[in-house]
Image (cartoon, grey):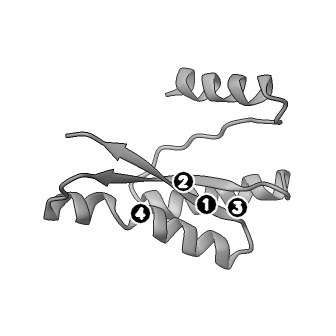
Amino acid sequence: MKRDLQKYVKVSRLHGFPADYRTEIATDVVDSVTRLVGKTAKEFPRSTVFTGKLVFKQENPFQKILHNETAHSIQRRLQWDGIPTVILPIRVDV
C-alpha cells in the first residue's frame, strides 16, 4: 500500500500539485478516516478530500451493504467539519 501511495504522490507532484499521504490500520473505516483527515486538514487547511465509491454494473445485496455507504458516510462527517469532500465513481467490472 505504501508503494502505491508513493506512486500517486509522485504523479501529483509531477503535475505541480503539493501532495503527501497518510495511512492507518483500523477496524472502523469511517471513524479512522475522519480522524486521520481531521489531523491532516489542520496541517493542510486548504485541502480537498477525494473518496471513491465502487460502482458495479449489477450490484448484489452484499455489495450494497459492504461498499455503497462508506464514501457517503465519510463525506457527511467531513463536510460537517467544513472539509471539502468529493466522491469519485470507481467502475468495477465483475
Disc 4 crowd rating (10 Å Cα; few below 14, some 14-19, many 20+) is some
Which residue lies under the disc numbered 2?
A: 51
Task: Answer above or below: position of 76 versus 36.
Answer: below
Distance in Å between CA atoms under marks 1 and 2: 6 Å
**Rendering quarter of residue 75:** bottom right
Q: Are marks 3 and 4 in contact (CB under 8 Å)?
A: no
Distance in Å between CA atoms under marks 3 and 1: 15 Å
Task: Answer above or below: position of 88 versus 71.
Answer: above
In this rendering, the label closer to the viewer, 3 or 1: 1
Q: Nearer the viewer, residue 31 or 59?
A: 59
Which residue lies under the disc numbered 3?
A: 38
Who comes first in sequence, dot 2 or dot 3? 3
**Picture disc at residue 86:** 1
Which amino acid lies under the numbered mark 2 shown in the image of this protein?
Thr
**Rendering quarter of residue 48:** bottom right
**Does 15 sit left or right of 7 as displayed?**
right
Disc 2 crowd rating (10 Å Cα; few below 14, some 14-19, many 20+) is some
